[in-house]
Amino acid sequence: MTIASRFLSHTTTSPGRDAVAIGGNPGQRWSYDALRRGTLAVAQALRAEFGAAPGPEVRAAVLLGNRKEFLEIFFGAAVAGIPVMVLDPAWSATEVASVLRDTPPVRLFCETATGPIADNAPSGTVVEVAGHGFEDWLRRHGGREAADGFPEFAEVPENALFYVGFTSGSTGRPKGAVRSHRSWLRTFDHYTAEFGIDETDTILLPGSLAHSHFLFGAVHGLHAGATVHLMPLFDAGLVLDHVERYSVTQLYLVPTMFEALLEYARRHPGRSFPQVRSLLSAGAKWSPTRQALAGDLFPNADAVEFYGATELSLVSVLHGDDDGPRDSVGRPVAGVELSLRSPSGGEVGVNEVGKVHVRSDMLFTEYLSADHRGAPDEDGWFTVGDIGRVDEQGYLHLVGRDKGMLISGGLNVHPEEVTAALLRLEEIAEVAVVGLPDERWGDLVCAVVRWRDGARLDLAQIRDQASAYVSRQKCPRRLFETAELPHTTSGKIDNRRVRNILLDGGQGMRELL
């Protein structure tokens, strides 16, 4: 069984039902049968090119925006038994070049072969999806002809590798993590159990398919038989229009998108969307005070946040109606085990801080590049370096990353812990916490704030209010304000860029005393 198996079964039971729509354009809607034809055409063409047993070293790659062909290639490669590298169109030229150079694909599907693609992709591997290039490639290898029927393909085992997802690059160049069909199929099971998504749902994914949160949402939605709506670009007003017009029941978000929806609704009051059953947020901690406002727009929605990673898949879930601590990331889902360990490797106790190790049947297999070492150990445990604690009720609280820790005045300070405290303040819409070199303190804890609705606090007020949630010694010692914070392509604040801007003079960031 592959990640495409259940999707293909829906194409025979409900061929005419809408599978995918993009941007609300009537001409950009495709039935399950139409998506099946595209999927099988790609599978046939890949098999014609690379044989019935291509092996994991044969990799396709997609560098595309949110378009139907992305999903056809993704599903088609799964059926053909060929892993897919998902590259991000928002990457810099340097990042694209680095990935193509380090782990070259045998077939690259992109909008157009210019810039770093032309300079770094292996010769003869590129298929341009815009224009006629994709159709020409399919016809050349018999794809469209085969898709008129139901071609049979050799069975692909569940443990076969099928997907290479890349980390966001917020701490360095993108790092590819390889997943098996089995790891996603088990994650499908947990999503279905946690959120009840089925063929009656309409799912809206306003983010890029290059990000695993939204790609997984699309693939799981089609696995469940739902209708999936994509957007070419995020636009808060259009998102709310789509939610209303298409009776969306499941909305995938990251916290920055939710903030934009709230801001748009504030400027255009009077609307409510009671048909939405779930808001599914991941990628960064959702401010508890902001999450509590979900009911203003979505009165019947379960405002869910979950913790995971490209390597770990789903780890823990915090439902909106959960009575657990809102500064946590929830309890582990069924089948997920946690082991929090001290630097010496021993287990820490309840409410003691340790490095978070995870074991489940959803973990990745290995990293793609030889430059990036790491895989689950012989006992099945893996860590991405997150630091946290588990409380008496079993809720996981994240406090930082092992490589991002600051040492300020001899005290260990995790920026995420300080960030979580600052996000409790109503005046703060977004904040980055970074360390700057200082002769006295070593790392001087600094906060760069984007204010909400014209509010403003000075440094003393920030320290006084934040100290209710985090030790005063860890509170910021310098405070900057800015109109806009830089983000990674996955929607997280890019702390590395923030720090570099401050080191270069803080252009656009003004210090407050």
Image (cartoon, grey):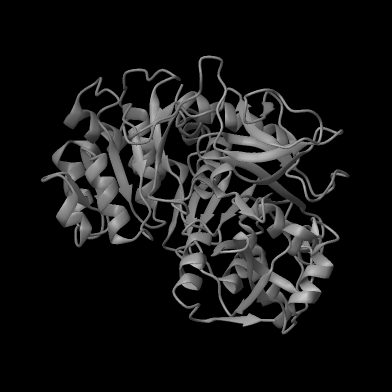
- Please, which residue is most extreme toward the top here? 378
Q: Quadrant of residue 119?
A: bottom left
Which percent across, then down, holds residue 135? Answer: 21, 49
Which percent across, then down, holds residue 324? Answer: 85, 43
How many badges with numbers are in the image?
A: 0
Which percent across, then down, holds residue 307? Answer: 65, 42
Visible residue check, residue 249? no
Position of 395 relative to 134 (above/below): above
Position of 180 relative to 24 (above/below): above
Q: In this view of the protein, which residue sits in the foreground, 367 or 297? A: 367
Position of 168 relative to 262 (above/below): above
Left or right: 259 as drawn, with respect to 232: right
The residue drawn where x is 78% and y is 57% is 288
- Please, which residue is most extreme toward the bottom here? 454
Visible residue check, residue 67? yes
Left or right: 372 as drawn, with respect to 193: left
